[in-house]
Image (tube, helix red, strand yellow):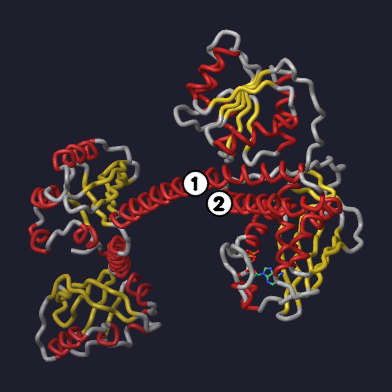
Amino acid sequence: MFDIASDLLLAVDTNSLQVVAANQTALQSLSYSLDDITQLSITDIEASLQDVFYWDAVSTGIVQSIHHVEGQYRRADGQLIDVEKSIVPMPGHPRLLLICARDTSARQQTAQALEHYTSMLQATLEATADGILVTDTTGRIVNINHRFARMWQLGDDLLARQDDSEILDAMTEQVSQPDEYLARLVEITEDLHNESDDLIEFKDGRVFERHSMPQSIREHVVGRVFSFADITHRIQTEAALRVARDEAEQANRVKAEFLSQISHELRTPLNAIIGFSQMLADDLPATQRDTVQHITKAGWHLLELINEILDFAKLEAGKLSVTLESVDIQALINDCLMLIQPIAQRHRVTVHLEPSPAQLVRADPTRLKQMILNLLSNGCKYNRPHGKVTVQVTGNEKQTRIFIKDNGIGISETDLTKLFQAFTRVGKEQHKVEGTGIGLAFTQRLAQLMGGDVGVSSAEGVGSTFWIDLPTATQPTTPHLDNPPQAKSADHAHHTVLCVEDDRSSMLLLKSILQKHRPNLHLLTASSGLQALQQATAHTPDLLISDMNLPDMKGSEILAKLRTIPNLTTLPALALSADAQAGDISAGLAAGFNRYLTKPINFNSLVSEIDELLNKPNQ
Ligand code: ADP
C-alpha cells in the first residue's frame, strides 16, 4: 500500500483518540518529539473538517477503514502539510487504529506550479496582438488564441467541434487564392525546420501577414507556431500614401513646368524691354538717359522678381544649390548699398554701413547679396519718412554676424512668430507696401544652406534688427566680378554669324547689339529651322546663335542638322534662350551648344562669348 519507510505512521487509541505511537518519519515531518506527540489527540494533528467527523464517529465506536484520502496535518509550528492517508485497524490490537500517511505537499506544489505556468502560457497567448495557431508536425491544431479565432471569423460552435478539416475549410474559403493558400500551407507544414513569411489576401480585401516558426522541445521539432497580423490598415495607408505621393509629384512636375513656362514667357518681352531701353539710353543725351534708364531698371527688377519666385520654388523642392567661397563682406555690402539707393530714396530713408572690421565669410556671393538686399529693402519699405537703416558687421574667427537695423514700424510679438513662413505678410502696413511675403523665408533658408541662420528682434513702433549669421572664412577672397569688363572690340571682318530667332523683337535687338558692338560681323538671319538650314548651306557661317524653340524645330535639332553639313561639322554654337532653368541650360550644353546665355541678354556677356567662339572656335 505505502512505502512504509518514507510514510508517516501513527497509532491512535480508538477510545481516547490519543496518539500512542509514531515512527521517525512522522516525528520529523510533523516536528514533534515522541513524548510530545503522544500527549496529543489525533484531532490536534489532523486539520480538516471531515477528519473531525471521522474521529467523532470513531469515538462513538464506528470504526471504518479508509483508503487514499486527501487531508491536511498541522505541524508543531502550526504550518499545514498536505497528505494522502489510509486508516486501518491495527492487526492484533482492536483498540488501535494505524494511520499511514504520505506527505504530498511537494507533489501538490508541482501540480499547482504546472497549472500556474499553463495558465500563464495561455494568458500570454491571449495577450499578444497577433492571432496564434500552434500545430503539430502533421499540421493538426494543438492550440489557438481567441484573437486567431476572431481574425479568421471562426465561430464558437465550429471551434467546439474541434474538427481540424472543418476549420481549415472555413479559413480557406475566405482567402482570395484558395488553391495557392492550401499548397503553401502544405509546403510550410512539410518543411519542419525553416521559418516562413507571407502575405494572405482575402476576398473581402483584408490582408494578413503570416509568420511561422518551428516549435522545438530539447532540439526536437514538435510542431509549428503561426502568428497572423492584420495589416489591412497599414496596406491601405501605404497605398493612400503612394497615391498622395504620386499626386504630389505630378503636381510638382506641373508646378515646375508652369514656372518654367511662365519664366520663359516673361523673359522674352523683358529681353526686348531691357535690351532696347539699354540701347536707347546709350544714344540719348545725358538729360534724357536717366528717364530711359528707369525702364531698364524696372525691367531688371521685374526679372529679379521672376527669379526670386523661381528660386524659391527650387529651394522648396531642394533643387537649389549654393557655391560657397570666401567673400569680402564689406565689399559685398557696399555693392548692396549702391543697389538699394533707388529704393531708399523712394522711401526717403537713409542707408549706411557702420564702421566694421574687415571680415571674410564663407558664402555664395550672389545669394548673399540677394539676402542682404532683401533685408535692406524691407528696412526701407517698412520704415517711416526720414527713417534710417544701418548695417553693421561683427564677428570672430568662427562666426560673422551682419546686422541690418531700422527704426521703422517694427513688428508685434505675435507677428514675429510667423515672420519666416513663406508667403506670410504681417502687420497693419502690409497692404500699403508691395511684397510677396517670400523674402524672409528665402533669406533664412539660404542662410541655413550656407551653414548659418537668420534672426530678428523687434519692437512695434520702435524698429527692427535683423541679422544674418554666417561662418567666418579664413582664405583670401576671390575677386567677385558682377559686371564683366566691356569686351574689347575685335576684328570680325571675315566672320559670318547665323542668327536664328523667331521672335521679331528679340531678333531686332540681337541685330542692333551686334551692329552696334561688332559692326564688322556679317549677319545672316533665319526665323525657322528650315530657313537656318538653307542659309547655312548657302553661306557656311562661322558661328550659330540660336534660340532654343523655333516653330518647326528645337534649337538642338537645328544644330545637329547643321553639323551634318560638310564644312560645318565643328560649327561653334551659342544658345540664346528664355529657357533659363538649370536643367534647360545643361540640356542645351549636352546637345552640343558651346555656350548658353539666357534672356534678357547681358550685352557684355554676349559680345565677349561671340568674340571667344569666333577666335577660338573649338572651345
Ligand atoms: P515681403 O516684404 O515681400 O512682404 P518678407 O518675407 O520680406 O516679404 O517679409 C514678410 C513680412 O515681414 C512683411 O510683409 C512685413 O510685414 C514683415 N517685415 C519684414 N521686414 C520688416 C521690417 N524691417 N520691419 C517691419 N516689418 C517687417
Q: Residue furthest top?
A: 566
Residue 76 at x, y percent in the picture: 38, 82
Q: Is residue 160 positioned above or below 411 on the image?
A: above
Proximity of marks 1 and 2: CB atoms separated by less than 8 Å: yes
**According to the image, label 2 marks what residue?**
313
Task: Name the quadrant of the N terminus.
Answer: bottom left
Residue shown at 8% from the left, 51% from the top = 166
Picture quadrant of residue 588: top right
Q: Is residue 81 visible?
A: yes
Q: Quadrant of residue 497?
A: top right
Query: Does label 1 or label 2 sit earlier along the sequence?
Result: 1
Q: Is residue 107 visible?
A: no
The residue under label 1 is 256
Q: Secondary structure at mark 2?
A: helix
Left or right: residue 606 compared with residue 390: left
Residue 399: where, in percent of width, then height? 81, 56
Mark 1 burial class by Cα count in 10 Å: few <14, some 14-19, many 20+: some
- The residues bearing labels 1 and 2 have C-alpha atoms spaced at a distance of 8 Å
Give the residue type at disc 1.
Answer: Ala
